[in-house]
Amino acid sequence: QKEVEQDPGPLSVPEGAIVSLNCTYSNSAFQYFMWYRQYSRKGPELLMYTYSSGNKEDGRFTAQVDKSSKYISLFIRDSQPSDSATYLCAMRNYGQNFVFGPGTRLSVLP
Amino acid sequence: EADIYQTPRYLVIGTGKKITLECSQTMGHDKMYWYQQDPGMELHLIHYSYGVNSTEKGDLSSESTVSRIRTEHFPLTLESARPSHTSQYLCASTPGGQLNTEAFFGQGTRLTVV
């Protein structure tokens, strides 16, 4: 079993839709949870970061962490064509290296 | 925008050649990483460094080597390229300290070995 699993996609939605991206993990020691966005032929860039359980909102993006279920989510409201990218979840424990999910490719159609 | 640069962006090279992928960052970050990324697969950590003169192997077995002579520079070398090395290579850095949370990535080097 992989340490981090992510809905594989690809996912295609119409512009304006609410998008839900999800990851599950097996290591209960993870405390830091991140979502990276990667455009085609670019490096990943940090989108959201959450420490431990809870929600965090930034504009149209909301990150949720449920440590009891070992489940994290990223919600995108009012999705735009510019949101079309691959979304990678990442997590780590204190002082440890990052562990990344395989990514979900999202296409938002105008 | 992150100040971390990788060269070349694209490289096509013949089997058996020696290659060096360059990575430089201007943020003064102590920790640097090399990842391998294949389509639809997670990033695999192949090497990392805590700082000058520190190099560690990552989770993915690799035939590459790295060096860290200067804080800002973390090159990756393949002594003899093979078609199995065809992949995208991503360099990243984080500030020092245990609570660093964000990794800054370069644009990547897409390597094709023919």
Image (tube, coloured by chain):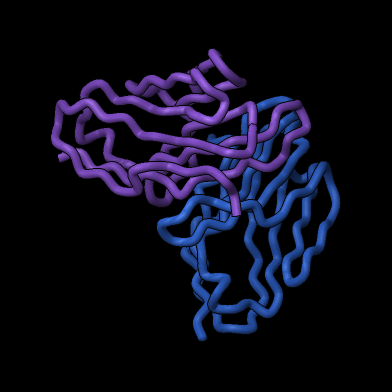
The image shows residue B53, relative to residue A75, as above or below, that is: above
Q: Position of residue A89 (x, y in %)?
A: 62, 49
Q: Position of residue A32 (x, y in %)?
A: 75, 40
Tell me the colour chain A is drawn in. blue
Label total for image:
0
Residue farthest toward the bottom in the current orientation of the protein: A110
Q: Residue at x 50, y 23 (%)?
A: B58
The image shows residue A18, relative to residue B103, as above or below, that is: below
Q: Nearer the viewer, residue A87 or B48?
A: B48
Q: Nearer the viewer, residue A79 or B75?
A: B75
Q: Residue at x 37, y 23 (%)?
A: B62
- Tell me if A107 is positioned left or right of B93 in this view: left
Residue farthest toward the top in the current orientation of the protein: B53
Q: Position of residue B105 (x, y in %)?
A: 54, 44
The image shows residue A107, relative to residue B89, as above or below, that is: below
- Tell me if A62 is positioned left or right of B33 in this view: right
Screen quadrant of the C terminus of chain B: top left
Residue B88 can be seen, yes or no:
no
- Tell me if B52 is positioned left or right of A65 in this view: left
Screen quadrant of the N terminus of chain B: bottom right
Q: Position of residue A74 (x, y in %)?
A: 69, 60
Give the quadrant of residue A94: top right
Residue B33 can be seen, yes or no:
yes
Q: Residue at x 47, y 28 (%)?
A: B74
What chain is the purple one?
Answer: B
Give the quadrant of residue B25: top right
